[in-house]
Image (cartoon, rainbow, N blue to C red):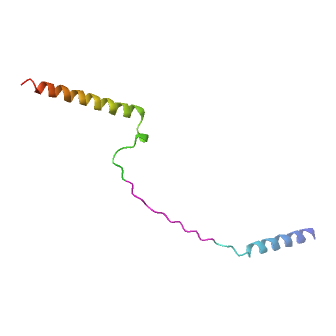
């Protein structure tokens, strides 16, 4: 008797939960692509070694250009 009673309650619970209307929420996502153009590399992406190397290269290039100009003046 207990088994029939428990079984009938289980079947009733399953039938009640399976008949519920499920609300389907429709979500729409808007994705916008934006093109970003940069003229030079941002310093945030460069490490300290790269930034220091660029500064040293600029200074060395200036000194080399000055020496080349001095050598050209001897003629």
User: Magenta includes 35?
Assistant: yes
On the rendered structure, is 67 left or right of 31? left
Q: Position of residue 25 (x, y in %)?
A: 63, 71
Image: 62 above or below 20: above
Q: Magenta part mainly helix, strand or loop?
A: loop
User: Magenta includes 70?
Assistant: no
Chain part drawn in magenta: 25-36
Please tell me which residue is depicted at 71% across the width and 76% down the height of the picture.
21
Furthest residue to the left?
A: 75
Front-lying residue, 36 or 8: 36
Please tell me which residue is depicted at 40% across the width and 40% down the height of the picture.
43
Q: Position of residue 71 (x, y in %)?
A: 13, 24
Q: Position of residue 23 (x, y in %)?
A: 67, 73
Front-lying residue, 49 or 28: 49
Please tell me which residue is depicted at 9% across the width and 23% down the height of the picture.
74
Q: Quadrant of residue 58?
A: top left
Viewport quadrant of the N terminus: bottom right
Furthest residue to the right?
A: 1
Please tell me which residue is depicted at 15% across the width and 28% down the height of the picture.
69
Q: Quadrant of residue 7?
A: bottom right
Image: 56 above or below 23: above
Q: Position of residue 18 (x, y in %)?
A: 74, 73
């Amino acid at each position: 008797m207990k088994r029939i009673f428990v079984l009938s309650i289980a079947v009733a619970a399953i039938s009640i939960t399976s008949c519920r209307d499920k609300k389907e929420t429709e979500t729409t996502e808007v994705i916008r692509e934006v093109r970003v153009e940069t003229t030079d590399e941002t310093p945030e992406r460069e490490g300290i070694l790269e930034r220091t190397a660029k500064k040293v290269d600029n200074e060395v290039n200036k000194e080399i250009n000055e020496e080349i100009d001095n050598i050209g003046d001897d003629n």
